[in-house]
Image (cartoon, grey):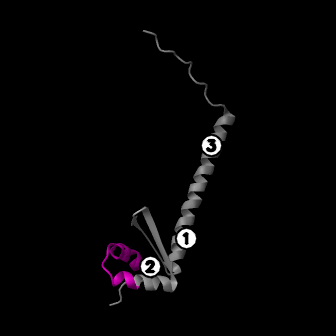
């Protein structure tokens, strides 16, 4: 039986290497924060513009349906007048965008 080969302990990072890792981590964190803020802003802008977005299963994986303005109004009217799987799933998105059923 051959004894396992022991490696000497790795050297610790130098100050310059440590600062480099900190800078890279901060850049990655900043990109994540910017992407999150942008996504939230876009979502709010879509709602203000009267847009509807619904994501659901499809035969090829997933599909995102996105309509704005009068096209969203027509699509939501069709959604509330139908009872198929797409319509039932999309009703929440239409209601959230303000295109719910009027009493």
Dominant SS of magenta comes to: helix
Compute the Cα span from label 3 to label 2. 42 Å
Residue 84 is one of the magenta-drawn residues: yes
In-image side of 26 versus 46 (left or right): right
The residue shown at (62%, 43%) is: 22
What distance separates the C-alpha of mark 3 from that of mark 1?
Answer: 30 Å
CA gap, disc 2 to disc 1?
A: 14 Å
- The residue at the far right in this view is 16
Q: Position of residue 40 (x, y in %)?
A: 52, 67
Q: Quadrant of residue 60?
A: bottom left
Residue 27 to residue 44: above or below: above
Closer to viewer: mark 3 or mark 2: 2
Sequence-wise, the earlier of marks 3 and 1 is 3
Residue shown at 66% from the left, 35% from the top: 17
Label 3 crowd bin: few (<14), some (14–19), many (20+), radius 10 Å: few
Percent from the top left, x then y, of residue 38? 57, 65
The boundaries of the magenta stretch are 77-96
Mark 1 lies on residue: 42
Q: Mark 3 or 2 closer to N-term?
A: 3
Q: Secondary structure at mark 2?
A: loop
Could you tell me if the residues under marks 3 and 2 are in contact, i.e. CB atoms within 8 Å? no
User: Residue under circle 3?
Assistant: 22
Q: Which residue is mark 2?
A: 97
Q: Around disc 1, counting alpha carbons within 10 Å, would you say few (fewer than 14), some (14 to 19), or many (20 or more)?
A: few
């Amino acid at each position: 039986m051959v004894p396992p080969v022991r490696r000497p302990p790795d050297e610790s990072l130098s100050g310059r290497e440590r600062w480099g890792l900190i800078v890279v981590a901060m850049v990655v964190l900043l990109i994540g924060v910017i992407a999150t803020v942008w996504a939230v802003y876009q979502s709010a802008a879509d709602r203000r513009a009267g847009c509807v977005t619904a994501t659901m299963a499809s035969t090829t994986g997933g599909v995102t349906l996105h309509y704005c303005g009068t096209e969203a109004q027509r699509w939501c009217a069709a959604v509330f007048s139908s009872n198929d799987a797409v319509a039932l799933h999309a009703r929440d998105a239409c209601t959230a965008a303000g295109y719910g059923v009027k009493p």
